[in-house]
Image: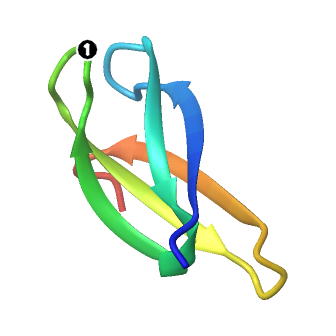
């Protein structure tokens, strides 16, 4: 079953608040999504633990 949750945070480039839809049923993963305000590419790092609790980090595209 797909579980989609809303997540909002500040874009690491422009600082504006953005809203992302996070599919927590897919487990931990890393992908690139463009900011809806400034269109810069953001690294989205989703971590899901064994209990299903999830966290999201937003980083610049070239951050490691």
Name the residue: 25% across, 23% down. 36
Q: Does 15 appear above or below 41?
A: above
- Residue 8, position as x, y percentages in the image: 56, 30
What residue appears at the point 55 percent right and 76 percent down from the top-left corner? 25
Position above or below: 27 against 45: below
Q: Which residue, given by chain and number where applicable, does mark 1 sit on?
A: 37
Q: Residue at x 78, y 88 (%)?
A: 50
Q: Nearer the viewer, residue 3 or 50?
A: 3
Locate residue 37: give its quadrant.
Answer: top left
Quadrant housing the N terminus: bottom right
Picture layout, residue 45 above or below residue 36: below
Residue 38 point in image, percent of width and height: 20, 16
Expressed as whole percent of the image width and height from the top left, the position of residue 43 reads 33, 52
- Rendered-image quadrant of the C terminus: bottom left
Q: Nearer the viewer, residue 38 or 63?
A: 38
SS of the residue at dot 1? loop
Image coordinates of residue 21 in percent, x first then y, are: 45, 45
Badge 1, how many Cα within 10 Å: few under 14, some, many 20+?
Answer: few
Q: Is the image coloured rainbow, by chain, by secondary structure, or in one colour?
A: rainbow
In the displayed structure image, the side of residue 6 where residue 53 appears, left or right: right
């Amino acid at each position: 079953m797909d579980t989609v949750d809303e997540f909002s945070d500040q874009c690491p480039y422009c600082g504006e608040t953005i809203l992302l839809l996070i599919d927590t049923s897919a487990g931990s993963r890393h992908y690139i999504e463009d900011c809806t305000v400034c269109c810069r590419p953001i690294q989205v790092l989703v971590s899901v633990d064994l209990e299903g609790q999830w966290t999201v980090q937003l980083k610049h595209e070239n951050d490691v």
